[in-house]
Image (cartoon, rainbow, N blue to C red):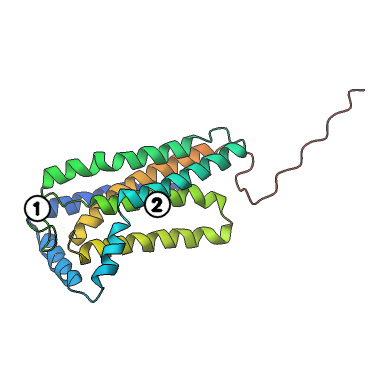
């Protein structure tokens, strides 16, 4: 992304999160449309077992181990390549994952949104979705960690796959009646801010690395000078 537009990403995410939060808290027209859309998705033809499987991909028991594997592999590769700050990006990824409940839980308590008709009907505190945020941060940071280790032709498909996966998790959550659509959108905004932070930290950790692409050959070492 060009440098002049880089600061616009977190600002856009904050603005969208503020809009969603305001509309849900104030019972605005966007909330009414969101609930109509949620009921339509809940009544869609997507089989309930498939929707349940997709929703479960946002469980910490599933998403966090995936991130842990990617984190360990990225840290091992960076240290093996003698990257000066090899620990910085994996540490940022771990902190981002740990920050998810610290951000989601206060929002849930503050907005106290009732859930849609479904298995959890009657409860409150559904905005934003913890499952959607967990999936977005876990799979998103895993992609950020693994992308530099892959061949260039595989990097974009990885990002597309992660985006599709998160859309599938959100569809499963809404189809099963666990959340309204805007619950997942707000989670993506929070997750996007965390992913943006990890991305910026990764740029800092890559500065000064002698061999940024593991698939490019290392430059030849200079021949030792003749002491005589």
Q: Residue furthest bottom?
A: 45
Secondary structure, mark 1, is loop
- Report if the CB atoms under discs 2 and 1 are less than 8 Å apart: no
Q: Residue at x 64, y 52 (%)?
A: 215
Q: According to the image, label 2 marks what residue?
A: 140
Disc 2 and disc 1: Cα gap in Å?
29 Å
Nearest the eye: 79 or 192: 79
Q: Is residue 195 above or below residue 122?
A: above
Estimate the x, y position of residue 217 in percent, counting from the top left. 70, 48
Estimate the x, y position of residue 43 in percent, counting from the top left. 17, 73
How many numbered marks, from 0 up?
A: 2
Q: Residue at x 38, y 60 (%)?
A: 163
Estimate the x, y position of residue 165 in percent, counting from the top left. 37, 61
Tell me, yes or no, if residue 6 can be seen here. no
Nearest the eye: 19 or 141: 141
Q: Quadrant of residue 37?
A: bottom left
Residue 141 left/right relative to 49: right
Residue 181 left/right relative to 201: left
Q: According to the image, label 1 marks what residue?
A: 123
How would you rate the neighbour count of disc 1 (Cα within 10 Å): few for under 14, some for 14-19, many for 20 or more? few
Q: Residue at x 20, y 51 (%)?
A: 128
Where, quadrant-wise, is the C terminus in this rendering? top right
Q: Residue at x 13, y 55 (%)?
A: 23
From the image, state whether disc 2 or disc 1 is nearer to you: 1
Residue 193, disc? none
Q: Is residue 215 above or below residue 169?
A: above
Nearest the eye: 41 or 22: 41
Nearest the eye: 2 or 48: 48
């Amino acid at each position: 992304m060009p440098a002049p537009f880089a600061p616009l990403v977190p600002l856009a995410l904050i603005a969208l999160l503020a809009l969603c939060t305001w509309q849900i808290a104030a019972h605005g027209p966007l909330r009414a449309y969101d609930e109509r859309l949620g009921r339509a998705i809940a009544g869609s033809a997507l089989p309930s077992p498939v929707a349940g499987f997709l929703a479960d991909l946002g469980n910490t028991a599933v998403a966090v181990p995936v991130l842990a594997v990617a984190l360990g592999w990225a840290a091992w590769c960076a240290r093996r390549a003698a990257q000066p700050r090899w620990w910085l990006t994996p540490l940022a990824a771990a902190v981002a994952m740990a920050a998810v409940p610290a951000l989601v839980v206060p929002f849930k308590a503050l907005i106290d949104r009732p859930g849609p008709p479904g298995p959890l009907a009657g409860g409150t505190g559904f905005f934003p979705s913890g499952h959607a945020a967990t999936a977005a941060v876990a799979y998103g940071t895993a992609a950020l960690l693994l992308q530099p280790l892959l061949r260039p032709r595989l990097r974009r498909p990885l990002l597309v796959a992660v985006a599709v996966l998160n859309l599938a998790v959100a569809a499963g959550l809404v189809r099963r009646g666990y959340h309204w659509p805007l619950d997942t959108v707000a989670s993506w905004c929070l997750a996007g801010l965390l992913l943006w932070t990890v991305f910026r930290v990764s740029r800092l950790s890559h500065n000064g690395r002698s061999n940024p692409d593991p698939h490019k050959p290392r430059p030849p070492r200079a021949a030792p000078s003749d002491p005589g």
